[in-house]
Image (tube, rainbow, N blue to C red):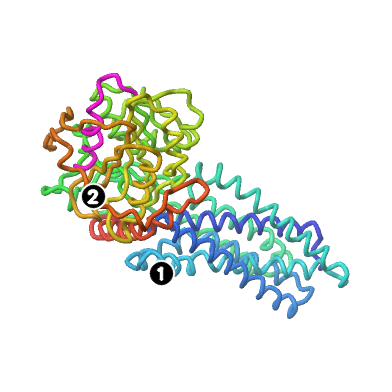
Amino acid sequence: MKTPTYLLYLLSFLEGGSVMVCELAGAKMLAPFFGTSLYVWAAVLGLTLLGLTMGYFLGGIMSKKYANDDRLLFWVLIFAGLSLSIMPISSKWIMEMTINLNLQTGAIISLLIFMFPPLVFMGMTSPIIINLLTQEANNAGNSAGNVYAISTLGGILLTFLSGFYFIPEFGVSKPSLVVGVILALIPTILLLKRKQMTAGLLFIAFFVLGGWNLGVQEEFPPNYNVLYESEGILGQVRVVDHPSFEITPDARIGRGLLVNNTLQTFVGHENDMQYSIWSWANYFPTAASIFPKGSKVLLLGLGGGTIVKQFHRLGYEVDAVEIDKRIWDVSVEYFNMDPETNVVIDDARHFIRTTKNKYDIIVFDTFLSESVPEHLITKEGFDDARKILNQGGMIMTNFYGFIEGAAGKAARSVYKTFLESGFNTKILVTPGSEDSRNIIFLASEEEKDFTNTQYEAPNFEKIDNLYEHFYDGKFIDLSDVEVLTDDRPQLSKLYATAAMRWKKSYNEYYQRHFFYEK
C-alpha cells in the first residue's frame, strides 16, 4: 500500500516543526538546573545539529535497506514523537543525577539522554521520505528540495508559535507532550490500518505516561510551601515560602521568587515583605537616597518588586520595565507591590530607545538566573541611557561580585565601558565573598557626594558614608579587557567563568536545602 504524496509532505512538515519544539523545550528544561549561559546554549545548538546529522546518516542507510517500505517511516516517526513527549520526564531524571557536574559536562550529558534521541529519529525521516518519493534518479533533486523546504517551513511556523505563544502560555511540558503525540498519531493510525497493533499499544502507553507526568507534583520538604509555579518566556518561575538557610542566623521563613531555581527576590514572610532578607539589596536604595524626594526612577528588571517598594519609601516616582508579565503578576499578588506601579512589559533596551520620558536614576537590574542581557551593557546601550537621563542623573547597574582574575573580566569590561562612555564611575561592593556578593556600578557625568545617605531599614545598619564600601578603581587592571560594543558583543563569553561558579553554588545550595531533599 503506497502512502499518498500529500501525506508524506504533511509528515515532513510535522517533523520539521517538532525539531524546533524539541530544541526550544530542551533549552528551557535545562535552564532550572544549568542556567541559560553561553555554554548551555552552545550545548543545545551543538547537540541539535549532531542529532540531526546522525539521523540523516542513519536514515540514508535505512532507506536503502528498506527501500519503498513506508512502515519504516511510520515507526521512526512514532519513536520520534513519543521520545519527544516524555522529555519532561527523562530530563528531570537525568538532571537530578548530573547537577553536581560542571555546567558544560552536566548540560551535555543531560541533553544526550533526553534531547538527542528524538532529534536522531526526526533527522532520519527526511532521507526516508525522499526515498519514498523518488521513483527516478532525475527526480531525486526535486524530491529532496521539496521535502527540506516543507520541513523547514514547519520548523519556521512552530518556532514562532512556540516562542510567541505555546511556551509563554502553556509552559514547556504541555507543548512537548502535545506536539510529540501529534507527530506520532498519523503514523500510528496508518499502522493500525495494517493490523500493526503494537503501534497502538505503544502510543497509548507513552501517551498515558506523558499525561501522568503533567499531573505529578514535585515533592518538597514539609517547611516549604510552593505558592505559585509556571513555565514561560523566562523559563521556570516559582514563588516559595521556605527557611533562609545560610542567609540568616535563625533560618527564619522568607518568601522567595525563583527563576530557573535561582532566587531573584527574597523577602520577609507575611507582615515583613517590605524588605529584602538579603543585606545587599539595601545598598541600592542607600546609594539612590542622595537624590531628593520626587525624583524619577526607571527600574529595568522588576523581580519581586522589593526595590520598587524601597524607592517608593524614599518618595520617588518609579517606572519599571519587565519582559515577562508573570513577574509583574506575582510581584503584586505574592510580594505586596503596589498594583498602581507603572510597569511596562517590554525589552529594556527597546524601551530606553523609544520612551519620551526622562529620569533622574536608571537602574539596570536585569539578571536572568546567571545571565546578563549583554545588549544592554554596551557603550551604545549606555549612550542610549544617557539620552533619557536628566542633568545630574545617575545609572546604577547590578552585577556579579567578581572583580579580579578570569571570573572578574566581565565586571572589569563593564567598568571600562562606563569610563569610555564618559561616566564618572564608582564600584560599590556589598559584603561577602566574591561568590556571594554583588557589585553595583554607580555612573554619573558629574561627581556625586555619597557621604550623606538617607536610607534606613530594619535589620540593616544605616550607612552614612558609602565611600567605605567602594572598591578603589586605581587598583583595577583594565589592560586585558575591551570596551563592550553592539558590534562586538562579548559579555557572554567574559562572564561565562563567573556564571559557572555562581550557578554551581546555587545548585549546591538548593540541593542541600530545597529541591532534592525528601
Q: Is residue 379 above or below residue 344?
A: below
Nearer to the camera, 394 or 370? 394
Mark 1 or 2: in front is 2
Classify 6 as above or below 398.
below
Residue drawn 55% across and 61% down? 84
> Does the image show residue 142?
yes
Give the residue type at disc 2.
Answer: Arg
Q: Is residue 471 above or below residue 316?
A: below
Q: Please determine whether, in this image, residue 458 is positioned above or below residue 126.
A: above
Residue matched to label 2: 437
Q: Separation of disc 1 and disc 2 at Cα?
A: 26 Å
User: Tag 2: Cα neighbours inside 10 Å, few (<14), some, or many (≥20)?
Assistant: some
Image quadrant of residue 202? bottom right
> x, y (%) of residue 288?
25, 31
The C terminus lies in quadrant: bottom left
Binning the other alpha carbons within 10 Å of mark 1 as few (below 14), some (14 to 19) or many (20 upward) gives some
Numbered disc 2: secondary structure: loop
Local secondary structure at mark 1: helix
Quadrant of the rendering where the N terminus is positioned: bottom right
Quadrant of the image occupied by residue 164 = top right
* Pointer 1 or 2: first along the chain: 1
Query: Was residue 145 drawn as part of the magenta stretch in this picture?
Result: no
Query: Which disc, if any, is residue 105?
Result: 1
Q: Disc 1 marks which amino acid? A: Thr
* Number of residue marks: 2
At horizontal 36% and vertical 32% (from top left) the residue drawn is 362
Q: Position of residue 159 (x, y in %)?
A: 60, 49
Question: Is 164 displayed left or right of 10 in the figure?
Answer: left
- Which region is colored magenta? 279-296
Res 53 quadrant in image: bottom right
